[in-house]
């Protein structure tokens, strides 16, 4: 595939999927990867209107929100960003560190790509 070609995958993500993705994205890498991860973090983050509707509350190590307040959000994820997510989830799987919260993301970004 042509490296200059932009491929955007419109992916519907729930609030929990967005939060989980924000936590599993790599914190280290080469310049290009970190630049893409920063952009992806911005896309996954919640704007002021979403914060207001969701009414996030952090208690200890857990975050709660109004689960009826917001529908899924379509996030455009380019091919390289999808690869980064895929690799992060595969690493968690290989290390046997996947949890139930990762399940739907694993299906979307790993199983669906490897079929």
Image (cartoon, rainbow, N blue to C red):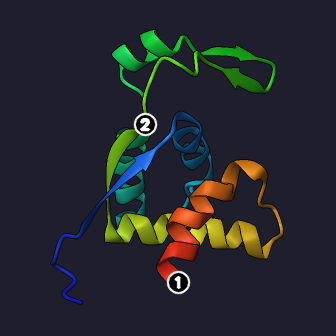
Q: Disc 2 to disc 1, how far (Cα)?
A: 24 Å
Residue 84 screen position, x and y as percent: 48, 67
* Left or right: 104 as drawn, with respect to 108: right
- Tags 2 and 1 in contact by the CB under 8 Å rule? no
| Front-lying residue, 80 or 105 | 105
Q: Is residue 60 above or below residue 14?
A: above
Q: Is residue 30 above or below residue 77?
A: below
Instruction: Name the residue beneath numbered marker 1.
Output: 114
Residue drawn at point x = 55 percent, y = 49 percent: 21
What is the number of the mark on residue 72?
2
* Left or right: 92 as drawn, with respect to 49: right
Q: Determine whether the residue tagged by mark 1 lies in a helix, strand or loop.
A: helix
Q: Determine whether the residue tagged by mark 2 lies in a helix, strand or loop.
A: loop
Locate residue 62: give its quadrant.
Answer: top right
- Look at the image and tell me whether residue 111 can be seen: yes
Locate residue 41: give its quadrant.
Answer: top left
Residue drawn at point x = 62 percent, y = 53 percent: 24
User: How many residues crowd around disc 1 within 10 Å: few (fewer than 14), some, or many (20 or more)?
Assistant: few
| Front-lying residue, 37 or 109 | 109
Residue 35 screen position, x and y as percent: 35, 56
Q: Is residue 98 above or below residue 1?
A: above
């Amino acid at each position: 595939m042509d490296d200059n070609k932009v491929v955007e995958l419109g992916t519907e993500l729930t609030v929990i999927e967005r939060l989980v993705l924000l936590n599993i994205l790599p914190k280290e890498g080469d310049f290009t990867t970190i630049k893409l991860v920063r952009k992806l973090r911005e896309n996954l983050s919640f704007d002021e209107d979403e914060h207001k509707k969701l009414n996030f509350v952090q208690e200890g190590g857990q975050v709660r929100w109004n689960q009826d307040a917001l529908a899924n959000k379509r996030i455009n994820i380019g091919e390289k960003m999808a690869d980064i997510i895929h690799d992060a989830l595969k690493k968690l799987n290989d290390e046997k560190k996947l949890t139930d919260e990762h399940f739907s993301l694993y299906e979307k970004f790993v199983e669906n790509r490897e079929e």
